[in-house]
Amino acid sequence: MESAVVIGAGVGGLCAGARLASAGLDVTLVERLPHVGGRWSTREIDGFLLPTGAFLIAMDDPLADTFEELGIEFPVRAIEERTVYLVDGELVGTGERGGLRSLVTAASEADGSDAETVMTAIRGALSGEVPASSQPLPDWLAQVGAGPQVVAALHALTQAFMALNAEEVTAEAFFDYLRATAGRGRHGIPPQGSVQLAENLASHVEACGGRVLRGRKVDQLLERDGRVTGALLIDGEKLEADVVVSNIGVHETRSLLPADQAASLPGPAPTELVPAPGMVTFVASREPYYDHPAVVVTGTRAICLVSTPTLVAPELAPDGWHYTETISTFRSSLDATEPKVERERHFADMDDLLPGWREDAELLKTSMYRGPWPVYRSWPGHDPQERFPLPGLALVGDAVKPHGWPGTGASAETARIVVGQLLG
Ligand SMILES: Cc1cc2nc3c(=O)[nH]c(=O)nc-3n(C[C@H](O)[C@H](O)[C@H](O)COP(=O)(O)OP(=O)(O)OC[C@H]3O[C@@H](n4cnc5c(N)ncnc54)[C@H](O)[C@@H]3O)c2cc1C
């Protein structure tokens, strides 16, 4: 195998391109936008560097490993404190270890459930001694003695890290997530924005002799005798290659194929592969609302996470300013049809969590993540694991993430798996 075309310069496509280029393949990476990174990039608004998606970068997961393995600079500043939780109006610190225990203990004090019983069941599920079924997480928790506040607390966790409401997560998927991230959880903030990380990967592709085409869109996949042989760009240029790696999602890849090939593309039917939506606001203020860069909030209408990246990286804002990011899931992650209602729920939570923001702060941006630009391209726990749907074609990115892995690390892991198999 000598050449590869990679469609999409999100984290999955960039990691795949960088790995393939490092292995000596002639790589052409095609990105429809003028900048790289996709939902792991940065936009400037009024001097504030705001993320296009991911903002908390794990420092001990497959993404960080990719940079280290390939010898690429990884400009991420560690968050020294662990994530804290807001339970019943009180901030609960998690100390060095035992974040989940602190959360369950604080929540069970509020609802009278027995934290030890619940934690024993959780430990049992993690070790495989207690069955973690495909029933919704709240049902499993109720069965092992958790009260409503404990369920609400773990709902905030599934929202913040799996982008789903607790009732949309199976107990199995939740414990897969806990297992994949066990012993990890060091996070950081890129002081120049995630775009700098994306640029570093793109530069690596170029330094290895590859090309990164920006502002160029793939219109069709080329195919001969049932094998994908390259890509046709919207401007008419044809790129032939031994393998095409698609980072744009299963539906979108399907739409680049002729009808008969698209129909025969294995994997779940489009209706079964549903993206996880969400909403985000960015608020600029002179003083931060919280002293912690990442606060998981429980018992709200919609918001699950309040982050103040400028506490760690003041470079992201003009001098003397901070910004706060608030993140929510939708009432139903299946239905993204009422953005106005979602906005009202989110803003009502902001009134509770950021007192006085309407008078004292400036709303920089509100973003809905849904449809082709969601939080995740498939619900965690429902991701297809088939990454080679046709000869000559491979899939990477968060549409095909391995079970358990969240966020950018999951997409980086798909690139590691796919490139490993391609190189045999
Ligand atoms: C609000 C929000 C917050 C998040 N927070 C975090 C977090 O804190 N930590 C974390 O780890 N993860 C987080 N995530 C998840 C993370 O951002 C995504 O899982 C990850 O960035 C997905 O990357 P990807 O490579 O799969 O896809 P994408 O980033 O979507 O990349 C696909 C690329 O393909 C390009 N493209 C599409 N069609 C074509 C075409 N026809 N031709 C050429 N190019 C094309 C797109 O422009 C895009 O650049 C968050 C996501 C959101 C939305």
Image (cartoon, rainbow, N blue to C red):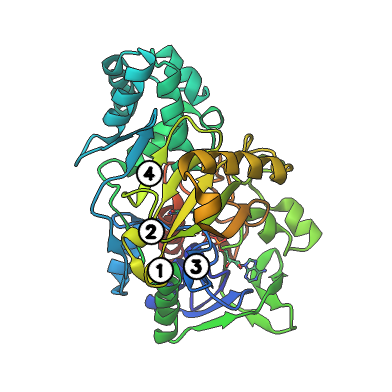
Q: Which residue is mark 3?
A: 41
Label 3 within 8 A of ligand 1 by Cβ: yes
Name the amino acid type tagged 2. Pro
Whole-angstrom CA distance, mark 4 to mark 1, is: 19 Å
Disc nearer the start of the sequence (1/3): 3
- In which of the image's four quarters is ligand 1 placed? bottom right
- Residue at point 53% right, 63% down? 52
**Residue reaching furthest to the right:** 259
The answer to whether residue 128 is visible is no
In front: label 4 or label 3: 4
In front: label 3 or label 2: 2
Disc nearer the start of the sequence (1/2): 2
- Residue at point 44% right, 33% down? 298
Whether pointer 1 and pointer 3 mark residues with C-beta atoms closer than 8 Å, the reply is: no
Disc nearer the start of the sequence (3/2): 3
Whether pointer 4 and pointer 2 mark residues with C-beta atoms closer than 8 Å, the reply is: no
Q: Which residue is mark 2?
A: 309
Disc nearer the start of the sequence (4/2): 4
Q: Which residue is mark 1?
A: 316
- The one nearer the camera, 255 or 82, is 82
User: Which mark, by number, is residue 295?
Assistant: 4
| Horizontal side of residue 137 vs 311, given as left or right | right
Whole-angstrom CA distance, mark 4 to mark 2, is: 11 Å
Disc nearer the start of the sequence (4/3): 3
**Is residue 255 positioned above or below 354 on the image?**
below
Whole-angstrom CA distance, mark 1 to mark 2, is: 8 Å
Residue 64, position as x, y percentages in the image: 32, 61
**Is residue 229 positioned above or below 132 on the image?**
below
Name the amino acid type tagged 1. Leu
Q: Secondary structure at mark 1?
A: helix
Name the amino acid type tagged 3. Ser
- Residue at point 29% right, 22% down? 119
